[in-house]
Image (cartoon, rainbow, N blue to C red):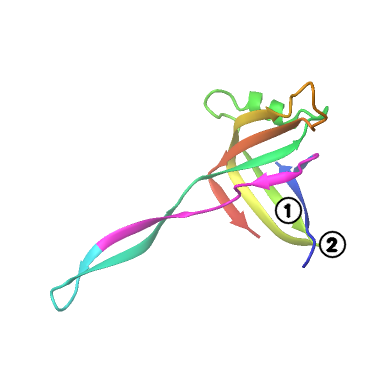
Amino acid sequence: MTAYSFRVEIEGVQVPGVTQVTQLATEREVVAFREGTAEGDAADRLLPGRWKTGELTLTRPVSADDTFGAWLHESGPAGGLRRAGAVVLYDADGVVVRRYGFSGSWPKRLQIDGLDSGADSVITETLTVVYEHLTTE
């Protein structure tokens, strides 16, 4: 089994400390239609439709870096500041294996977890990001 590491970039700048990326996916709509056959019967057919938009989550321990919060506030009420980004996978030798690029993205939600005064848990922040397009390189 090959060990991989990853980093997250927003507008070409590495976002420090990201420990988990989830829901990085792309999906197409399915267009169903009924077609007449030469024998006069009906046959159901499926065609690939438009690509759907997506969302991903980025999780990291809370630190002095305010990349998540700054982007959240800069995006404005109408999602005004859209950015491009990527999740880049590296093999054990540090060579890029795959790059998952996302574009037209903006932060939807910032969630803070682990705030418990009686526990020794790590406080994390999770940023949910919506995007219009996902590519692989």
Quadrant assignment for the C terminus: bottom right
Q: Position of residue 104 (x, y in %)?
A: 57, 41
Please tell me whether mark 1 or mark 2 is closer to you in this view: 2
Q: Residues within 10 Å of mark 2 (few under 14, many from 20)?
A: few
Q: Residue at x 70, y 41 (%)?
A: 10
Q: Helix, strand or loop at disc 2?
A: loop
Q: Which residues are magenta?
A: 16-33
Q: Is residue 30 above or below residue 122?
A: below
Q: Which mark is residue 92?
A: 2
Which residue position holds label 1?
88
User: Which residue occupies 69% across, 56% down?
Assistant: 99
Tell me residue 108's x, y (percent).
58, 32
| Residue at the right extreme of this rendering | 93
- Within the image, what quadrant is residue 122 found in? top right
Quadrant for the N terminus in the image:
bottom right
Q: Is residue 102 left or right of residue 43?
A: right
Q: Amino acid at mark 1?
A: Val
Question: Observer-nearest residue: 86 or 117?
Answer: 117
Where 36 sits versus 108, above or below?
A: below
Coordinates of residue 18 in the picture (x, y in percent): 76, 41
In front of the other: 9 or 45: 45
Q: Residue at x 79, y 23 (%)?
A: 118
Q: Amino acid at mark 2?
A: Ala
- Picture quarter containing residue 124? top right
Position of residue 87 measured from the top left corner of the image (x, y, whole percent): 70, 50
- Check the image and name the residue furthest to the front: 118
Closest to the observer, 108 or 59: 59
Q: How many residues crowd mark 1 within 10 Å: few (<14), some (14–19), many (20+)?
A: some
